[in-house]
Amino acid sequence: MIPPLARLWQPAALVLAIMLLIALPFGLERYGIYILSLWAVTTIAAIGLNLTLGYAGQISLAQGAFVGIGAYTAAIMTSAGWPLLVALIVAIILCFAVGWLLGYPALRVQHHYLAFVTLAFSTLAFLVFRNEQWLTGGIYGIFGIPRPTIFGFSTRSAQAFYYVCLGALGAVSLMAWWLVRSPWGRAFTALRENPLRAQSLGIDTRRYTLMAFAIGSAIGGVSGVLYAPLVEFVDPTPFSLVLSLNLLLMVIVGGQGFFFGPFLGALIAVLLPEWLRFTKGYYLIIYALVVMLLLIWSPSGILGILDEALTRRKTRRASALRAAARPTLDEGRAP
Amino acid sequence: MASFMSLVIAGLATGAIYALIAIGFSLLWQTSQTINFAQGEFVMLPAFFVLAAINAGAPFWLAALIGLVISVIILGAMFKRLLVDPMLRHGVLPLAIATMALSIFLRESVKEFYSAEASPFPSFIPGTTIGFAGISVSLQHVGVVLVAIASVMALTALLDRTPIGRQMQACAQNPDVARILGIPVERMIMYTFLINGLLVGIASLLVSPIYLAKFSSGETLGLAAFIAAIVGGFNRIRGAIAGGFLLGIADNLAAAYVSTQYRGAVPLFLLIAVILLRPQGLFGKAEERTV
Amino acid sequence: MNKRHPFNRWLIVGAFAACLAAPAGAQDAVKLISVGELSGGGATVGTNFKNGADLAIAEINAKGGILGKKIEVTHYDSQSNPGVARGLIQRAIDEKPYAILGPGFSGSVKVTAQLTSDAGIAQVMGGEAAELTRLGMKTLFRTSFGQQSSMPKIAAYLVDEVKVKSVSMVWVNNDFGKGGRDTLSKELQARGIKIAADISTEAGQVDFAADVAKVKAAGADAVFVYLNEEESARILKEIRKADIKVPLIGETTLLGQKVIELAGEAANGVRGHVGLTTDAPVPAIQEFRKTFVTRYNYVPDHNGIKGYLSIYMIKAASEKMGKLDAKGLPDALKNLTILASKEPGILMDVTIDENGDLDRDSFLGEVVHGKQQITKILPKLKK
């Protein structure tokens, strides 16, 4: 058994991390706060993708496009005077619906075809963002997106908006936490582990897979809704296929299927240029190299390594206990 | 009509290059379930091997040969040994992601260590234009199509007519049975990687005089080849060729007759249509293996 | 599988503590921070700008720096992403630099200009979109002509010199190409010239057969080509193949050395307006080009010159002030005329106006036998 102290250790660390995230802005300059906000926004998108990929086992190459849809929804609606909350609801519904429409035919065919369809969709979405100037401002983008006022408090300052992003991250995390532990979430995991068996157990695999993808996409939309007022500018370039690939990379590097995988993956991706600043132009080369080595070592990402190490330690402890227990038994049996 | 024909011919030439890249793509998939996201960068890189050899004083023919040999060694053998082998047992996705990282690695390395600029690239085929029944056709385009078709025919002959080729096909269809039959599966898989190294080398020699050698050129090419492979059928070489040609022509006709702003969308609609109506690809066969 | 681990959270905590501490700045140097497109879609633009700036800094430091202080520069990579650029400019401002260089993409400039304006720090950037200097920012300065100065010259050239009635336009669909296309169409329509075809192309496009077929079908009196270097070269080859005889008109890039090198014979006969390029018949520019090639082993495009000039503009303004006053720098840059006779590094006489736009001589040129030849010098608007 795990001693009680060790069991307390985990919630304690979580509380500490949350407190730190709340306290951090007071020790940071505006840039640090901006990067933290960007991390929170990116993490939300990665959490969505982790639901699709890590829990339902579907590869989506369009998460970046859903972030884009969210961002444009927020930009267009708030510029027209709507509150951000309304834009958020519209973006969630829109992304969920688009995800459903996209996944429905793809999953009907064969399950890995969702990857191909989302690849196509990702590029299509970019073209629409760029070409439909009447709606999206085209290549010039939408400039001067206002930050919201919540209960009379303006979130114009970097710090205030950071707490908006952090709050959203908290809400999305809780929801994802609940989802993963709900009967739904168990069905998702069953799907990933063994689709055939899940089907034979009476789980409507297609509907659940579709649901996971649509929910993941909607969370991508939430991330976009925050991105627009954070940067206060939206143009098509950030939402190309590259963003989708990067988000995928983040989820895998952090550890797909681990709850905290997206947090870690996004952290690395957002902070990496900072860490490797001293290498000048070589940071992307080093990043790519490290990712390859990491995946060779542990295909389930960084948390996969930790998980393995922890399991090994537990096994060692268990076998040590067994080893210690055996002589006693022998002695007991000895006359 | 003349302009329509010129468009089709130009599309065929571009499509031939897509096809060469797409074939390697589906070869790797068939034999080792490798989805190579770095395939575009694999085409970008040999051009720089050749340029480096030229800068070191080699004549073009020798430099081209050196480029092909190096790409077979590095993009074929080393790619398999260093990246694919250790990851193969982990399944499709981690390896696909690793090749994504590899593409970043190759692209950024060329940019940092060679140049961020495009470099002109010499061509075996003169760029002269010949007139034919009112259609002007560049020799370069004709040459590209011919070389690509010749490469594909050679490859098909290798696969269908030689014992090694048949063993490779056996490995692709069912590695377990192949192993029981005493076929050295590992070696056969290695051969497909070497062939892919050669194909991307040839594609590089063909595309670089037209497209120029640049660190970023792999992005467009890789994506186009990927789509061509899916449209044609991921598990058939013939499919990859058809997919390549189809994509090249469709792109040109779409730009000419539909919209230049949305030309990039046409291959994607093609892709979605194929997936919905004929998921195994236009020329592929239905696959039992699931990913 | 989904067990929580204490380690990962500690990792996060430690990472923040280690990475976001505000860096300490050196006091005894002129501190510049450059935010540019060093990777992603704009890598060529950003790398040129960076190399040009580095070259100028090396030259100035070798001669003792600005007012006796050496220049120190830090380069940040915006990854060609406006969101990242905004963060990095914020970081740059937090570090309290003397001035900020870049970015090169107009979209990235637009999201960052308000920040530097609020902080009162001069931002010397590479964007060419017409609107940038009309945003009312007090601290934004160009290093080249904006499209609002170059496109009227092209329009006038088409009307007065080439004497055309209709034009086909081929442009690259990004903020550079679209901006130029929008500005020029307005100018052409104001002069009563018909736009026979309006063709958008993609950056990195492989096959130009369809675009050229459209140009041919439109049958205009001239073709205006506004693409990046590589695509310019590719379309020129395709145009020659299609046997199109009408004049091919370009702005700066189309007549550049890079395009001539890449397109070979297909570039001959191309005409147009040339802002500052490495081919300008000015000894100082030829000298700059030689130094650049020796150092970096390639011929820079106009973004290389922009980076180079940004440093000399800052130097001239500082010397005018007689002190290194970051807050005063934007005002010192305004209405400043820098003479090449006094500051050779500026390459050509230039006047910076109230809005941060530049005014200087430019050229009309033509490519003859694989060489750019200047046919006419267009004088500065204001003397």
Image (cartoon, grey):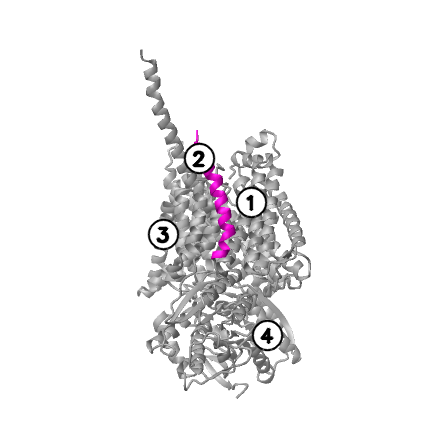
Circles 3 and 2: CB distance less than 8 Å?
A: no
> CA–CA distance between discs 1 and 3?
44 Å
Q: Residue at x 53, y 33 (%)?
A: A194
The 10 Å Cα crowd at callout 1, few under 14, some 14 to 19, many 20 or more, is some
Q: What residue type is labelled 1?
A: Ser
Q: Mark 3 against mark 2, which lies toward the viewer?
A: 2
Q: Which of A275 and A242 is in front in this view?
A: A275
The 10 Å Cα crowd at callout 3, few under 14, some 14 to 19, many 20 or more, is some
Q: Name the residue under label 1.
A: A173
In magenta, the rendered stretch is A1-27
Res C134 label:
4
Q: Which amino acid does label 3 sit on?
A: Ile
Q: Position of residue A272 (x, y in %)?
A: 43, 54
> CA–CA distance between discs 4 and 3?
52 Å
> CA–CA distance between discs 2 and 4?
63 Å
Q: Where is residue A295 in the image (x, y as percent from the top left)?
A: 42, 45
The 10 Å Cα crowd at callout 2, few under 14, some 14 to 19, many 20 or more, is few
The N terminus of chain B lies in quadrant: bottom right
Q: Mark 3 points at which residue?
A: B74
Q: Where is residue A179 in the image (x, y as percent from the top left)?
A: 58, 39
Q: Nearer the viewer, residue B144 or A126?
A: A126
- Badge 4 element: helix
Q: What residue type is labelled 2?
A: Leu
